[in-house]
Image (cartoon, helix red, strand yellow):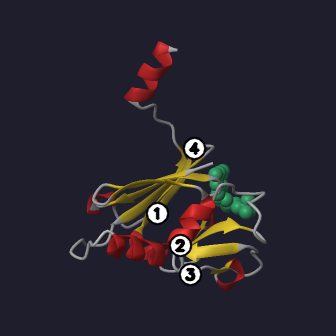
């Protein structure tokens, strides 16, 4: 399963958990960030800084927020500044996650454990300070216009 990563300034990626982890220059044990959590992870800031320099982008300010959407539609919107210890858990002992597949976000410095989103399939880097300074999370309850049109055509 691939994860869709969207940055309005840089572009889009479709990567498996392992492919995404390979884009980060280093991985570490999840227990270094969250006690008693097993598995391998990479740092969100470290990946993003690397992706920017790979795309030769030096003049872009940091995103204001990260939005992650899970396979069950659970969604979290997190101010970028809360992600300074955030990690993407992509494997456990080299095997795919049994809980949280394809990838799980952990936000140790976040306002709530509820931000540790399992089953992340979509990641959006947002640049909109109007989205505010608080994290929010929950299940999406909106139906997008394009989804409605798709359903009608089926
Ligand atoms: N995809 C998804 N991720 C989720 C949730 C969810 O319902 N769906 N619940 C969140 C909430 S409210 C909490 S408290 C934690 C629970 O993590 P745990 O299952 O490891 O205890 O997962 C978070 N991640
Ligand atoms: Mo929660």
- Whichever of labels 2 and 4 marks the residue nearer the N terminus, that label is 4
Distance between the Cα atoms at labels 1 and 2? 8 Å
- Whichever of labels 4 and 3 marks the residue nearer the N terminus, that label is 3
Distance between the Cα atoms at labels 4 and 3? 29 Å
| Secondary element at tag 4 | loop
> Which residue carries the number 3 mark?
26
- Nearer to us of marks 2 and 3 is 3
> Which residue carries the number 2 mark?
110
| Secondary element at tag 1 | loop
- Whichever of labels 2 and 3 marks the residue nearer the N terminus, that label is 3
- Whichever of labels 4 and 1 marks the residue nearer the N terminus, that label is 4
Q: Are marks 1 and 2 in contact (CB under 8 Å)?
A: yes
> Which residue carries the number 1 mark?
135
Q: Position of residue 3 (x, y in %)?
A: 54, 52
Q: Are marks 1 and 3 in contact (CB under 8 Å)?
A: no
| Secondary element at tag 3 | loop
Q: Which mark is residue 73?
A: 4
Distance between the Cα atoms at labels 2 and 3? 22 Å
Is residue 111 visible from the viewing direction of this image? no
Q: Are marks 4 and 1 in contact (CB under 8 Å)?
A: no
Q: Position of residue 97 (x, y in %)?
A: 74, 60
Q: Please name whichever residue, 88 or 113, is drawn nearer the observer in this view of the structure.
A: 88
Dot 3, how many residues are within 10 Å of its Cα: few (below 14), some (14-19), or many (20+)?
Answer: few
Q: Position of residue 135 (x, y in %)?
A: 46, 63
């Amino acid at each position: 399963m691939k994860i869709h990563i969207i940055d309005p300034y840089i572009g889009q990626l479709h990567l498996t958990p392992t492919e995404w982890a390979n884009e980060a220059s280093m991985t570490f044990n999840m227990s270094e960030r969250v006690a008693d959590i097993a598995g391998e992870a990479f740092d969100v800031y470290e990946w993003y800084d690397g992706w920017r320099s790979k795309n030769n982008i030096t003049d872009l300010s940091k995103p204001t927020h990260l939005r992650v959407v899970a396979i069950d539609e659970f969604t979290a919107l997190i101010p970028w500044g809360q992600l300074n210890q955030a990690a993407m858990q992509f494997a456990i002992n080299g095997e795919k996650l049994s809980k949280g597949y394809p990838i799980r976000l952990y936000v140790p410095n976040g306002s709530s454990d509820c931000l540790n989103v399992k089953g992340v399939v979509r990641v959006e880097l947002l640049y909109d300070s109007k989205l505010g300074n608080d994290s929010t999370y929950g299940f999406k309850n909106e139906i997008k216009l394009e989804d409605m049109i798709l359903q009608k055509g089926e």
